[in-house]
Image (cartoon, grey):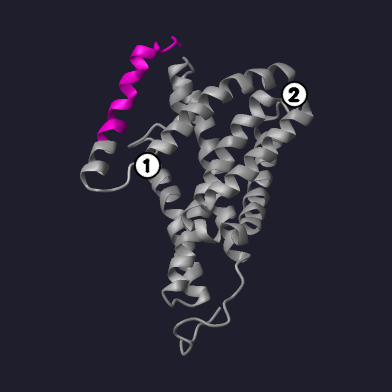
Amino acid sequence: MSVIPLTHLAFAFLPLVLVTAVLWRWSIGVRPLGHATLRMLLQLGLIGYVLTFLFDSNHPGLVASVVAVMLCAASWIALRPLAGRRSGLYPRALLAIAGAGLFTLAVIVLGVLRPTPWFDARTLLPIAGMIFSNAMNSVSLAAERYEHAADGGAGHVDARRQALETALIPLLNAFFAVGLVALPGMMTGQILAGVAPHVAVRYQIMVMCMTFGAAGLAAIGYLALVPRRTAHPYPDRVEND
């Protein structure tokens, strides 16, 4: 693949600028988007050098440390919609994302890809990133929806059902759309790199299964750890588990 010149890369910001303009025009705060964009640029710029170092060293201790940092960060970011309750919910989010994410990572790395050595940074870290990020988004949706439904008077079981259904929406949409509407990230990247489409499809199937599994299990794990509320605004509501 050819290297994208920075002057060409600048055009990629045009849709972002248009969204920012609409947010400003509609009196919606643009600070979160500006903050997120700045962090995205800084983090991606930094990770390029970090990954080069990790790939060259390929030390299991360093790889494990990076995975641990990714898990902690994903769990914290997942609770961004519930900023006021982050500290209390963080252990639950961390346990859910770590359990689902590490299980799925082990299945994919040890069962499907089987790199040598098994902790190969070039294989393990990108796969871990995809798994943890999808688990993070799923937990974020589930946590926000559960708290919103419970605060609105829904019982535990009903709020849990609503939360899981909401968390699965983007995952199911991705399954329906892949190949018809979208050629997702890994497949697109491999095709652009010159890999035959029928080979790229196998990797994309792996990615779809692992992201759905990790995200779904993370949402289920988080909601399973939510304690049943002993009271809510409608105490006369009867629910069956």
Label 2: state its secondary structure. loop
- Give whichever of 85, 118 is nearer the camera: 85
Q: Which mark is residue 116?
A: 2
Residue 2 inside the magenta-drawn segment: yes
Label 1: state its secondary structure. helix
Q: Which stretch is magenta?
A: 1-18
Q: Residue at x 63, y 18 (%)?
A: 52
Mark before the other along the chain sequence, 2 or 1? 1
Mark 1 neighbour class, 10 Å CA radius: few under 14, some 14 to 19, many 20 or more: few
Q: Is residue 241 left or right of residue 15?
A: right
For label 1, the residue is 31
Q: Residue at x 66, y 57 (%)?
A: 91
Q: Quadrant of the C terminus?
A: bottom right
- The kind of secondary structure the magenta stretch mainly shows is helix
**Dots 2, 1 in contact, CB < 8 A:** no
**Amino acid type of the residue tagged 1 in the rendering:** Arg
Give coordinates of residue 236: x percent, y percent.
46, 90
Looking at the image, can residue 118 be seen? no
Mark 2 neighbour class, 10 Å CA radius: few under 14, some 14 to 19, many 20 or more: few
197, above or below 181, in the image: above
Give coordinates of residue 142: x percent, y percent.
49, 59
Give coordinates of residue 73: x percent, y percent.
60, 43
**Amino acid type of the residue tagged 2 in the rendering:** Thr
Residue with the most extreme bottom position: 236
Residue with the most extreme left position: 25
